[in-house]
Image (cartoon, grey):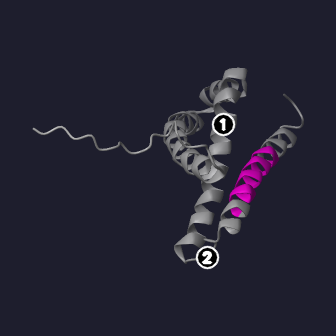
Amino acid sequence: MEITNRPLSPHLQIYKPQLTSVLSILHRLTGVALVVGTIPFVYWLGALAAGPESFANAQALFGSVVGQIILIPWVFALFYHLCNGVRHLFWDVGLGFELKSIYTSGTIVLVAALGLTLLAYIAAYTMRGGAG
C-alpha cells in the first residue's frame, strides 16, 4: 500500500459557522428531536386513551419543570422543522437560491419558529385559564 501526502479535506473546525450551515445542522437536529420527542407524545396519547387518572398523571408530568424542559424545545423543533420544510419546498421549485434570499428566508424561518413557539405557549397558557 502506497502512502500519499495528499491534503485532507478541510474539517469543520476550519470553517467559520455561517447562517446557512447552522440552519442546515439545526434542521437535521430538529428532525432527530422530533423522532425522539415522539416517544413522550405517544405516552401522552396512550394516557389520554387510558382514562382520566392516567391522563392527569401525564398532564402533571408534562406540566412539571422537567416536562417543560422536554416540551418547549420539542415544540420549537416542530415549528422550526415545519418552517424550514416550507423553505425547502420553495427551493424544490427553484425559488430563493440567490444568496440574499437564502439569508433572508433563513432569518424568517428562525423568527417564525420562535414566534410560533411563543404563540403556542401563550395559547396553551390562556386555554388553561392562566393557571401554571
Q: Residue 54's x, y, as percent? A: 60, 27
Q: Residue 17's x, y, as percent? A: 61, 44
* Label 2 crowd bin: few (<14), some (14–19), many (20+), radius 10 Å: few
Residue 41 to residue 107: above or below: above
Taking the spot 57% from the left edge, 33% from the top edge, the residue there is 47
Residue type, label 2: Leu
Residue 73 to residue 58: above or below: below
For the magenta stretch, what is the residue range?
A: 105-119
Taking the spot 73% from the left edge, 62% from the top edge, the residue there is 104
12 relative position to 77: left or right:
left
The disc label shown at residue 73, or none: 1
4 relative position to 16: left or right:
left
Front residue of 56 and 126: 126
Give the labeled residue for mark 2: 95
36 relative position to 64: left or right:
left
* Label 1 crowd bin: few (<14), some (14–19), many (20+), radius 10 Å: some
Mark in front: 1 vs 2: 2
